[in-house]
Amino acid sequence: MANKYLSERNLKFLLYEVGQVEELCGLPFFADHDRESFDMMLGTALRISGQLLYPAFRDLDQNPPELVEGQVRVRPVVRQLLEQAGEGGWLSATFPYDHGGMQLPVMVNTACLYAFASANFSASAFLGLTTGAAHLILSFGTPELRETYVPNMLSGRWQGTMALTEPGAGSSLSDVAVSAVPTGQGHYLISGQKIFISAGDHDAVENVVHLMLARIKGAPAGVKGISLFVVPKLRPEDGKLVPNDLNTAGLFHKLGYRGCPIVQLAMGEAGDCHGWLVGEPHKGLAYMFQMMNEARISVGKQATAVASGAYYASLQYAQERPQGRPIAAKDPTQPQVPIIEHADVKRMLLFQRAVVDGSLALLLQCAKYADLAGHGEGEAKDNASLLLDLLTPVAKTFPSEMGILSTSAGLQILGGYGYTDEFPSEQYFRDVRIHPIHEGTTGIQGLDLLGRKVGMQGGRAMKLLAGELARDISAAGQVAELAEYGQRLQAALERLLEVTQAKQELAAAGEVAVFLCDATLYLELFGLVAVAWQWLRQALVAAQALASGVGQSDEAFYMGKLATMRYFFHYELPKAQGLADRLGESDGLTARLDARLFSD
Amino acid sequence: MNIVVCIKQVPDTETQIKIAGDGKTIATDDIKWVMNPYDEFGVEEALRIQKAKGGEVIVVGAGPKRVTESLRTALAMGADKAVLIEDDGLYGADPLAVAKILAAAVKPLSPDIVFLGMRAVDDDAGLVGPALAEFLDMPNLSVVTKVEVGEGSVTVQRPVEGQTLVLEASLPAVISAQKGLNEPRYASLPGIMKAKKKPLEVKTLADLGLDKAGKAEIAALTPPPARAAGKTISGETAQELAANLAKALREEAKVI
Ligand SMILES: Cc1cc2nc3c(=O)[nH]c(=O)nc-3n(C[C@H](O)[C@H](O)[C@H](O)COP(=O)(O)OP(=O)(O)OC[C@H]3O[C@@H](n4cnc5c(N)ncnc54)[C@H](O)[C@@H]3O)c2cc1C
């Protein structure tokens, strides 16, 4: 079990047994796929993870990118990975055949990319950015933009990015100020600054293609004046690549996630930065939401992957580290026991596993909704699309926020050793910290969920979700050992629905500030309910498998699932009650608090 | 140029091996099966030669149905066709019998080169390659780290004790691959999809008119002895430490 960072058994359990991914092969778009090809793809992803990515896990952290003479340098493994991803078809796996893709279900792709991220999150981040950027050009760009950029990106030779953030526009994208002036020659002249752009410049690729938000001169203020542009580092001109007056103005040193450069970009310092409009003017933010929504789910996946690495590191340590004796039999002449024998260590391990497996289940559930929303039929397609919209902020935030706590518990399990760089735990702890920040902070996700998602189409998505939960709760009612947990989930769901209604009444009464002031808490409550649901689903499958009789190692696996489910319901879900209590109050304590009171 | 690569399916080296109740075989319940890593070098080399010289790459495996997975992996890497000699009893069979069976399946394919791994990581016997060459009546080039194909001949390198032997043989020949021959590619996603449609022929021992009866039999398997706890040598000064270490090595470990 040396250096385990994920469980293949668990990945397959969630994909095949719980997620029933093979059902998707019944849809025409996925008809060429089957279990055999899924297994081979997953197997290949696991090999790339183990042979190429994991060996560079420490290296990327200890040798972060450098800015040398205006060019960012990254470690060699980044180029190897990008080449491999290009040749292997990983960058376009989910795209249609006629866009060079393999029409792979997002579910399977998610599982594969999860393997990459759990082996080496920093390295894996380069891939999703290119895929998302290419997808935007394919969806909304002109044929000429597609031909010029997409093949070079999907072959791994050009990096894609999402360039939204500016020094004056982070959470508030409506304040994007980079300007675009039409030239009448098919391109615009771009000027301004972008900041914190991931993979925004590096030497593992020939070129970097920024999908950039900017404001066309004279455009209205706010989000209705933002357009989307392709702004390359080098622009193709007469069959050659020439500098596009887009310079790397700075490289940031970060707490974690150190293998991937985040840079500040300066466009148009010499008045010669060309950008090409994607789609129609002033619709840029709506287009960008395609990439942002994909990226939000991807953040959840990466957070879970990092937490998975941390879990297996502390599990292995806990099995090997002798310290202390059983509380009920402290005989100093007896040898010390491995710390995994201590109840408090078991509690921390259960917490880690509950976060990892629960989050991954939720993410694969969302991936299935993405597949059905993209390629399903009729009502199922519409419903899946709504459910995905609703759950996106949850699937981004629960793994990200709980990832911090679970990697922290992992570090704690190693005691003093966990605080040193002799063990990987501290790196996981640092690496995971980015996730509640990028792709919209947790605060912004809360506003999105409560302010927009739960109320959309008269609350239809919420009703659909309640229906999905009801189905599994009723199935649990048929299984003696699970009925109680179905009831607990039912009670938590009811509290969530009550709170939602109370909040919406505040909104209807015009109390907007009070309505939204605890949106982050609401998101936390929502996450607990959603993940408890995913644990109940896993328990249903595990209980059924155990009832039908399984071999020894499978038995341990399924019993472990049931134990972790019980942990989640007894230790984590009860927190929903406290959150619901607070959310039921409408005093607006924080909203009404005078900021001047922070005089000390 | 037609190239055959013989593939054995073995437990993944990270699998924890347990001995089965009979004391002679391994318990197969929790095993993750993979292509023998040395055979991967053979597949990769065959594909590279094919790219330069044209022709066909055919992979051949013998064993239970699950061996299909490893053959499909080779097809996904780029091989053109596969042949499986399916028989549940072939895993762990006498290497000479296996070589005879492979020879019978390979001969009608009239290969110019037959690749295989220099040994399988499960039983480490290293017998199938030389025996196969003998049964096919071809030169045997073993433990090879470099291959250059000429006109009707092949030149290979074998590392020995810090030197390199350069060997030349006429074609057809059997070449067994050593680590360092190349860096095997990963299957690509399009390759995996294409592999499903490539021909995979299944034969039985009866089709070949052979059986798996061999001359050697595994009498018993024993696990390696459990590792004893380490010992810490103590002492106040470097001299004292060295003296205590020497004492322990002589009196306890009895190695000096
Ligand atoms: C490692 C890293 C990689 C990144 N990669 C990219 C990238 O590839 N592309 C890109 O465009 N950007 C990227 N970013 C930028 C990232 O998306 C922003 O940092 C993030 O959106 C927050 O913006 P900000 O830093 O300006 O913080 P601010 O917006 O100033 O937020 C500061 C705090 O105020 C809170 N806050 C702000 N507004 C509100 C509000 N209306 N209501 C409640 N609370 C609010 C926030 O939640 C946060 O806690 C990256 C950042 C980092 C650190």
Image: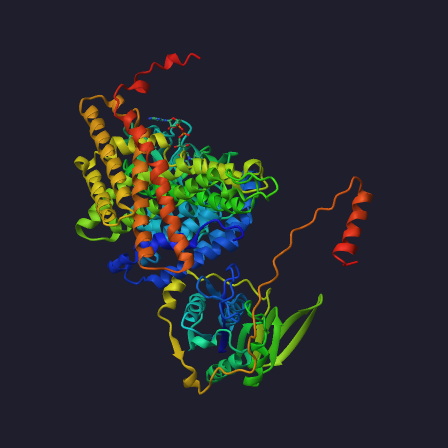
User: Residue A503 placed where, x, y %?
Assistant: 23, 27
Rendering quarter of residue A333:
top right
Quadrant of the image where one finds ligand 1: top left
- In the image as oriented, which residue stretches furthest toward the bottom? B209
Q: Nearer the viewer, residue A329 or A106?
A: A329
Residue A261 at least partly seen = no
Q: Is residue A177 above or below residue A103?
A: above
Q: Nearer the viewer, residue A55 or A585?
A: A585
Q: Residue at x 24, y 45 (%)?
A: A473
Q: Nearer the viewer, residue A587 or A210?
A: A587
Q: Give the color scheme: rainbow, by chain, secondary structure or one colour.
A: rainbow
Q: Is residue A32 above or below residue A315?
A: below
Q: Is residue B6 above or below residue A72?
A: below
Q: Residue at x 53, y 71 (%)?
A: B24
Residue A66 at least partly seen = yes
User: Residue B107 placed where, x, y %?
Assistant: 49, 84
Q: Residue at x 26, y 30 (%)?
A: A451
Question: Image quadrant for the C terminus of chain B?
Answer: bottom right
